[in-house]
Image: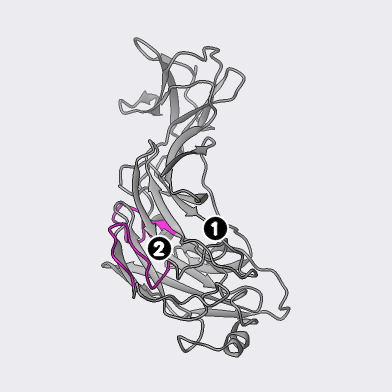
Amino acid sequence: MQSMPFRIMCKTILVKHIALIFLLCSIGFTALSQRLMENLNRGVIAVPDGNGKVLVSWRWLASDPDAIGFNVYRKTSGSPVKLNQQPLTKVTSFLDDWKDTVSERTYIVRTVQHNTESKSEEHFVLKNATQPYLSIPLQIPPGYAANDGSVGDLDGDGEYEIIVHIAGKGNDNSHAGFTDEPLIQAYKLNGQLLWTINLGKNIREGAHYTQFMVYDLDGDGKAEIAMKTADGSKDAKGRVIGDATKDWRNDKGYILAGPEYLSVFNGLTGELIHTTDFIPPRASTLNPTTADLKAIWGDGYGNRMDRFLAAIAYLDGKHPSLIMSRGYYTRSVITAWDLKKGKLEKNGPSTAMHRAIKSMPDKEITILLLQM
């Protein structure tokens, strides 16, 4: 393994393309107020600006009252020093103009309500006042590099962990060729590697194939990871999904046959929770012909068929659902899933959309909330 730094600029969430296919959710204000959400801490962080100042920022939680305020302290040695004159009520950040770039310091944030400061606090230790990012060492196999990333609270402690797609040799859907096996890894912010999932040779490496969702789907306070899998995919404990002896790649490196799965994994351990058939399948048979695929998806070699999107939506206004989309340009099919009692259950019928203009690009997905 080679150790590589993964840099986070202040508060960063790396995301895939987002914008064109719309899923409409109709809920009321009462349901919205009951929505199951992440139980996060304030996420206090301090980042030097490169000019001798330090930006301290934190979260305003959905459960906070409108009248809440914040006090910010700096501690080097001895008692903490309060930095703001009045409680901060309009912003969740403070710029500390302290020119010392050598001393390690701790920034502390305390809430204020009804002119009373809370005894509880959250803090961040700034060890290097000249480095405007967090550097997280990654354990990456030779020939691989960090690719897309996401965040989620995997262990329920209120702090985000980072989930990274570790990619080797890949190919775009429009290009033939064999690829390396896609890897998914989870890290704590201190660089501790929690687990590695290997999607195997029957999941092609490339920008459009693996859209992994990180979210608390079952409401237990810990995020799960969901993604498309295939014969030979392995969870973090080495448990094989499907048949590890199967190789469904054709002579051009495309995977146009064989079973397809949707799997959800435990976010803390990387262990498989449940696997079901991916919907929609490529075709009604496991070995469709080129003509079959072209009739359904617009081409016969997987360029349009094997472009995937994913999202999370509160379809009932309270519980999160996993949204998986397949297909660009000619045909797109969206399916919703719920995780209930350790099982993925399809939420309603799949929605298929066909394009009047087959060359129209639609590479993105957005979840819209309609209150009616």
Q: Position of residue 292 (x, y in %)?
A: 57, 89
Q: In the rendered image, which residue does mark 1 sit on? A: 169
- Magenta stretch holds residue 312: no
The part of the chain drawn in magenta is: 213-241
Residue at the image position 48 percent from the left and 89 percent from the top:
284
Q: Is residue 109 left or right of residue 119?
A: right
Residue at the image position 47 percent from the left and 68 percent from the top:
203
Amino acid tagged 2: Ala
Q: In the rendered image, which residue does mark 2 sit on? A: 226
> Which quadrant holds the N terminus?
top left
Label 2 to label 1: alpha-carbon separation: 23 Å
Decide whether the magenta segment is chiefly helix, strand or loop: loop
Residue at the image position 57 percent from the left and 61 percent from the top:
207
The vertical placement of 180 against 358, above or below, is: above
Residue furthest to the front in view is: 251
Near-viewer residue (255 or 298): 255
Q: Is residue 51 left or right of residue 186?
A: right
Q: Given this view, does label 2 or label 1 mark the residue nearer the observer?
A: 1
- The 10 Å Cα crowd at callout 2, few under 14, some 14 to 19, many 20 or more, is many
Q: Quadrant of residue 261?
A: bottom left
The vertical placement of 110 against 317, above or below, is: above
- The 10 Å Cα crowd at callout 1, few under 14, some 14 to 19, many 20 or more, is some
Q: Quadrant of residue 224?
A: bottom left
Q: Position of residue 230 (x, y in %)?
A: 41, 72
Residue 61 visible in the current orientation: no
- Magenta stretch holds residue 240: yes
Near-viewer residue (339 or 64): 339
Amino acid tagged 1: Lys
